[in-house]
Amino acid sequence: MIKLRLTPYANTAWAWDSATGLYRTADGRSEVTPLGHPMLEHLALTDNTRALVIVRERASGRPTARPEPRTLTPADFDTARTAAERWPLDYVLVETAPGAPVRVSAGPCGIAPLYVAHDGTTLFGSWDMADLAQYARTLSPREVARLLIYRPRYSQETVFQGIRRVTERATAHFGGHLHVQYPEPALHSGPRELADDADVLGAFVTSMDDALDARPLDAGSTVFHLTGGFDSGTVATRAAERLPGQYATSTLLIAGPGRESQSRRRSQIRDAVSFADTDIIVDAAETGVLAPGCVRRGGARISPYEEPLHHPFTRMTELIAQHGARTVVTGLGGDEMVALSQQEYPHKPMGEISDALPWIGARARAALEFADDAIAPPARVNSMTLLSLETTAPVLLRAGIWPVHPFTDPDMIQLGEWLPYDWRELKQLQRRRLAVLGLGPDVTQSRTRESFAEVVQHALTAEARPLFDVMLKDGSPLFEEGLIDPDGLREGLRQLDLGPYREDGDAQLLEVVDLHLAAAAFL
């Protein structure tokens, strides 16, 4: 939600330039550019010594802040600084003072990523990693290894040494050297015993209402991602119940055996309550993940953390924007809201190294010993959810669309933590809620798997091979750094060609492509 250029130990008198939509210091050495969007607001405060610039989500029922800097007494400034961290939605704070390092603090929601980099005198930041490409020095073996084996970790580390992530509630300090300070761990609770008269579905509906009402959504410019799954389905149907016929919907259509089921389930969900007539559907198989026209394939600087299905997701986002939407509401975080603990459902952790990944280089294998080092402490929002939010935001923000994720609301998260096992197992909470709307077993008890596995398979077997051939012929930073073994990659491609396709193994080749294209574009 913010881009910035900050020079410490310099002028701290900020002014708002309405013509360019940014804050700038009197000497021009520092700038803060808020994302201009009706769901966001920004303000600046000073006590004639210290300065605070705030960019944050707008909260319902509160007047919109004026952007012009306001002068406060030192005591009132301290009070305002404390209150800024109690804002109920997401925010970024920028603090400057004479003779002191600059500070940039992220809010608790992680809706838009914040990456930072620096030269000898200035700190730069952006939600779009491409803005910081010139500061990418080389690849981080540990972070590349995590992504290659599908073992992501939420931390300040990124694929590129020289570019850091300011994680939720973290603060970046810069006075010539950069230090990103993690926050204290967020506290969580566990399942509780239900009272005999407990109305779980009623509490679920109330928490959804509160999450939807927290921000000033405008129905005419809001689109709901409606995949046909339980999470987006429960949120979208509740919104449509409250404002019948007002909300448009959208989705990416999958391939394979689940395609017909997805279409049928979506139709039944849209028929159960009244949505707007507009339903934006992009066929992910037809659009192609790495088809010609894909900006990632074309050499654009696309962060390796952005949506793996970047091309079809971008196309859907463009159509949503053409519809006039400024906000998209998703079901992200629904899995984690009702997730079972390791004690309740013992299972192997994701991202185990195996012989099915012969292309993993020696340096990457060695780095995996430290895969869990230096990660962020527990957050209010599940770390896997935070990483998912990071994949979707840049594409949406480029199109002028702000994402809203109700399942990341604190009350929704707490409700999920308090629910007994039998309400969380196999998403019984969402299933029972959809059943109340009259949706039958075809929606609430579907046995057909619906995923993008076949779309990824097509990308690797029909679209990616020329990219691999160029990579093996001309080289890659991944080879040079010992993170991908070219001989192992050739063996993996030989197995892919001979078939049969192995979803657990071959699918990870898409990460190889994305990382190679990102490294080639950034370095």
Image (tube, helix red, strand yellow):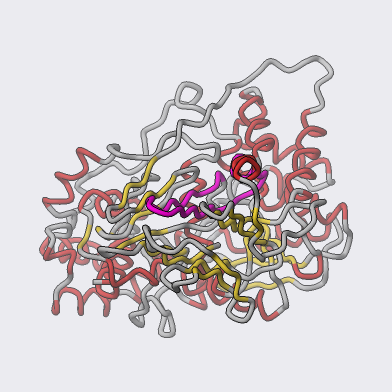
Left or right of 363 on screen, residue 429: right
Q: How many marks?
A: 0
Magenta run includes residue 82:
yes
The spot of residue 430 in percent (x, y) is 70, 40
Q: Position of residue 339 (x, y in %)?
A: 55, 34
Residue range corresponding to the magenta coloring: 80-108
Between residues 418 and 174, which one lies in front from this camera angle?
174
Query: Is residue 3 depicted above or below 341 in this figure?
Result: below
View extreme (bottom): residue: 293
Could you tell me if residue 377 is visible in this image? yes
Q: Quadrant of residue 78?
A: top right
Q: Position of residue 396 (x, y in %)?
A: 57, 68
At 60% from the left and 78% from the top, the residue drawn is 318
Q: Nearer the viewer, residue 305 or 460?
A: 305
Quarter of the image where one finds residue 268? bottom right
Question: How far from the left and from the top, in percent, is residue 467?
Answer: 27, 77
